[in-house]
Amino acid sequence: MSFDHSLTLDIPFQTSRQASIACNTLSPDPILKANELTVEYSTKESHLLVKFDGASDRVIRVAISNVIDNLKTIIECMDEFDEPEK
Amino acid sequence: MTLIPKATYAAPDLTREFVPGPGPHSTNGKTTQISDIVIKAGGEDRDRPSDAKDSELGELRAQLTTLQDHINIFLTERMEIDKNKAKENEDLERRILDDGVDEDDSD
């Protein structure tokens, strides 16, 4: 299914390992309203890319703010507990 | 090195790039705190995020909060425009229908 509204997040991390941890942490989340929205997670080197395609600005607004909230928690956990590989 | 998050929006009528901008950035977002009404009534945000640490990832978290504010404000405005357009269309439809009734009345 294709939708005409899209928003792509590009989040840089210190290492590709961190980007991959963030991707694997977020991607199991089920998509609510799958008939109105798709979310694709991927990594490119040390960047996490999240692409939202939605039927309206409203569904993207709800989904993206939720994903960013989760991302901030992931980043905070890495900052507290994870040492980047040298 | 500073980690700077970005976002790209695309719709049939417009595309837009988002960056956090020069800052200063903090983890206390305008669009993610509890409502102004509750704050004015003396409410306390118990889910308030911890301050960003002075580290690369701490700065990324603060920058991401600013980016989230920019996106939320932009999309909320777009939703408002859509709502007003829908209302205008409804009003126009009503006017046309009402005119029709007037013509009938004048017969």
Image (cartoon, helix red, strand yellow):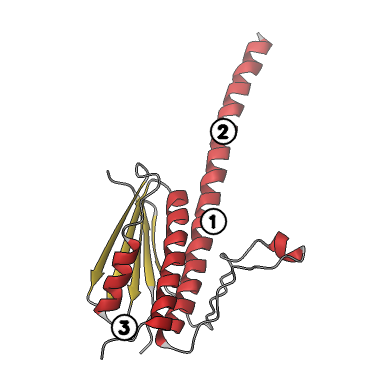
Residue A49, visible in the rendered structure:
no
Are the residues flagged by discs 1 and 3 from a single subunit? no
Check residue A79 in the rendering and tell me which mark sits there, or answer none: none
Q: Residue furthest left?
A: A45
Q: Nearer the viewer, residue B9 or A64?
A: A64
- Could you tell me residue A42's position as x and y percent? 25, 65
Residue bearing the label numbered 2: B90
- Could you tell me residue B51's position as x and y percent? 55, 81
Q: Nearer the viewer, residue B95 or B12?
A: B12
- Identified at 35% across, 63% down, the residue is A26
- Could you tell me residue B69's position as x and y percent? 52, 67
Where is residue B64, by image quadrant? Answer: bottom left
Query: What SS does tag 2 mark?
Result: helix
Q: Identify whether B48 is placed above or below A54.
A: below
Residue bearing the label numbered 1: B77
Alpha carbon separation for disc pair 2 and 1: 20 Å
Q: Do the residues labelled 2 and 1 touch (CB within 8 Å)?
A: no
Query: What SS does tag 1 mark?
Result: helix
Residue bearing the label numbered 3: A14
